[in-house]
Amino acid sequence: MPYMFISTQIRLENGPTNVGDEFSDPVLMNYLGARKTTMLGNNFSEYHVDDPPRLVLDKLEKIGFRVVSMTGVGQTLVWCLHKEME
Amino acid sequence: MPYMFISTQIRLENGPTNVGDEFSDPVLMNYLGARKTTMLGNNFSEYHVDDPPRLVLDKLEKIGFRVVSMTGVGQTLVWCLHKEME
Amino acid sequence: MPYMFISTQIRLENGPTNVGDEFSDPVLMNYLGARKTTMLGNNFSEYHVDDPPRLVLDKLEKIGFRVVSMTGVGQTLVWCLHKEME
Amino acid sequence: MPYMFISTQIRLENGPTNVGDEFSDPVLMNYLGARKTTMLGNNFSEYHVDDPPRLVLDKLEKIGFRVVSMTGVGQTLVWCLHKEME
Amino acid sequence: MPYMFISTQIRLENGPTNVGDEFSDPVLMNYLGARKTTMLGNNFSEYHVDDPPRLVLDKLEKIGFRVVSMTGVGQTLVWCLHKEME
């Protein structure tokens, strides 16, 4: 699972930060301290942490993920990260 | 065909993911398990998969595609991928 | 002319694709099969091709252009390409 | 803390520039001459400088931060920077 | 001053292109043939050229600036450039 997305709504200075979808690696989600939730009206689950995105990126850097690209779509900021697999 | 685009609407945690246009390589589309459809009112075809974009990126990484850039346009998130040809 | 822009409106699966402005290299425009047009009400010309942007990127790759960045602005998707000059 | 964000509202030619959140490194914030403020109605703090973003990037370059990606979200421009840790 | 921004409004095929703020290097602004103006109602100055952004990037390439990232924010397209300092 070399690719990972994190995203946050509206403001980048605070959380929560969305760190995963229902197929995300549970070990990785546990490392970030994420909890799995299903938002009202959604038919899929997500993983969230309370940390702002900058702290999440710093944690992910320690296990090898690097930011490839960042973008805004609507009110959401998204980061695309990649980890080299050998 | 060194370049490839994938895109998704509104949410990045779930599919479907658009993985090709009518000129896309059928072997590549078959590898991703994509089906060809023509949306009502469109005069061109597209290829879709049910996987969320993260899983598609992970599959594409295995055959040499890397994310170059990601952007949002309207309600759509787009990834531009590139594969080194020798 | 190491930099080049291509852009498309609304959908990335089909053309036309805008590939140049009035100062673009005619040899490069000819290689892409582009035609020069002046849109009604504009005081500047543009070059278009009917190909979708993915096919244009594949053609440009063959002569040394690489995608540096991609972005959406309004309803338009823009790719910024660069070619190493020696 | 290898990652850092800076952001500015509407115009990129002038400040203020937002350079940190409440967990930002105080030594780094002091190097930039940033002041900590809590905006009316927010339950979190931010760090600001009066410099335009270009001058902030030049200062951050001197201590090893490089721009990884830049994006617009709503009326805000955001830069994501990274510093190699050894 | 390793970082530089250029931006253009609405269309990427023609100028004017904004190339600097009031703290920009006068030698660099002179190289680009830019003129300093203060827009009505603004309390800061800007530098403009009549060239479209592609020609500005080509000129900046000649003196060592490379595009790091490009983004759209509102109706504006922005390029972030960087020059290696030794």
Image (cartoon, coloured by chain):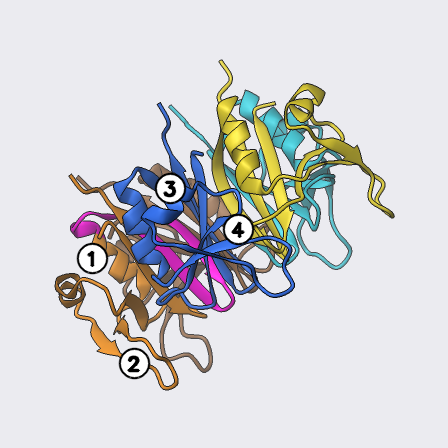
Chain colours: A blue, B yellow, C cyan, D orange, E brown
Which residue corresponds to the image point at 46% horizontal and 47% vertical from the top-left?
Answer: A5
Asked if one can make out residue E50 in the rendered structure from this viewpoint, the answer is no
Location of mark 2 (residue) = D38
* Residue B36 in the image, given as x and y percentages of width and height: 78, 32
Location of mark 4 (residue) = E52
Mark 2 or mark 1, earlier in chain: 2
Alpha carbon separation for disc pair 2 and 4: 41 Å
Location of mark 3 (residue) = A27
State which region is magenta. Answer: D61-81
Alpha carbon separation for disc pair 2 and 1: 24 Å
Element carrying mark 4:
loop
**Callout in the foreground (3, 4):** 3
Total labels drawn:
4
Name which quarter of the figure residue A80 lies in: top left
Location of mark 1 (residue) = D59
Element carrying mark 3:
helix
Q: Could you tell me which chain the residue with mark 1 belongs to? A: D
Element carrying mark 1:
helix
* Residue D4 in the image, given as x and y percentages of width and height: 28, 56
* Residue E14 in the image, given as x and y percentages of width and height: 58, 53
Q: Residues within 10 Å of mark 3 (few under 14, many from 20)?
A: few
